[in-house]
Amino acid sequence: GALLESNDFVSAEKELRKALELGIARDRVEPMLGRVLIEQGEFKKLVQEIDAQRVNDSAARAEVLASLGRAYLGLGEQELASQQFLAALKLQPTLPAAMLGAVRIMMANGELDAALRSLNDLLTRNPQMAEGLALRAGMLRERGQLAEAAADYRQVLKLKPDDVNARANLVMVLIDQQQIAEAKQQVAELRKRSPLALASNYLYALLAYRDG
């Protein structure tokens, strides 16, 4: 659990696999293993290795199904993803990961207004859900609601200060809003926290170019 919280997902995966080898119950291990594989973008590995049918506890099985749904979405298998999310919601109607999955399916189907309504409802119940906030920020940005998008990205960064994508997207929104001074501050913070990230150097160069 501690490794999961520390965002050291590679080490967390090793520890969880060791736990399975030692015979610790799948109900305890597989939901966490699913989340760790999602965080690493290991979608193929997840769908090949994790089977919700092996998990007996209904709450744990719902979590595994939600992770499987997210993995299938990542692999472009929308129909399979939808099936997993629906199965998860049958077991746990308010499971945030499954509700977010359902929102992603609506977005993929072009039901953007319904998706945003559902996402607003989800975030009212789960205001600390960084993945949901980042998704909503992107939707709001596309609608030209820049102040609201920036507020969501800032909230993501309060929860996950090292989130490169959220900080890079916040910089782009600030540039769109002509808030160049704050954009520069955020780029400096990005370069300090993630000096090797491509976005760090790209955004630094972009702002330098604007200054001429």
Image: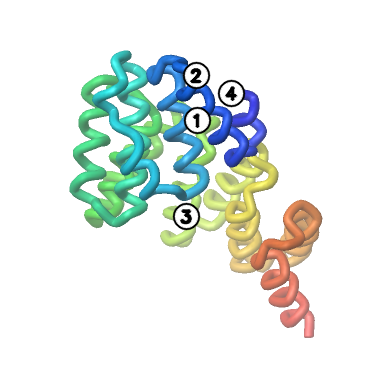
Please tell me whether mark 4 sits on a helix, a strand or a loop: loop
Q: Which residue extends farthest bottom?
A: 212
How packed mark 1 is, by other alpha carbons closer than 10 Å (few <14, some 14-19, many 20 or more), is: some
Please provide percent x and percent y for residue 37: 47, 41
Question: At x 21% / y 23%, what residue is drawn?
Answer: 90
Viewer-nearest of labels 2 and 3?
A: 2
- The reply, left or right, for residue 181 in relation to residue 47 is right
For mark 3, what is the residue?
Answer: 138
Q: Vertical placement of 7 versus 31: above or below?
A: below
Mark 3–mark 1 Cα distance, whole angstroms, equals 35 Å
Q: Tag 3: Cα neighbours inside 10 Å, few (<14), some, or many (≥20)?
A: many
SS at circle 1: helix
Quadrant into which the N terminus falls = top right
Residue at 47%, 24% (x, y): give it: 21
* CB within 8 Å, label 2 to label 4: no
In this rendering, would 152 be left or right of 66? right
Residue tagged 4: 1
Q: Residue furthest front?
A: 21
Specify whether residue 75 is in view.
yes
Mark 2 vs mark 4: give the one in front: 2
Q: Looking at the image, is mark 1 or mark 4 nearer the viewer?
A: 1
Disc 4 crowd, CA 10 A, few/some/many (<14, 14-19, 20+): few
Residue beneath disc 1:
17
Give the residue type at disc 3.
Answer: Gly
Kind of residue at badge 1: Arg
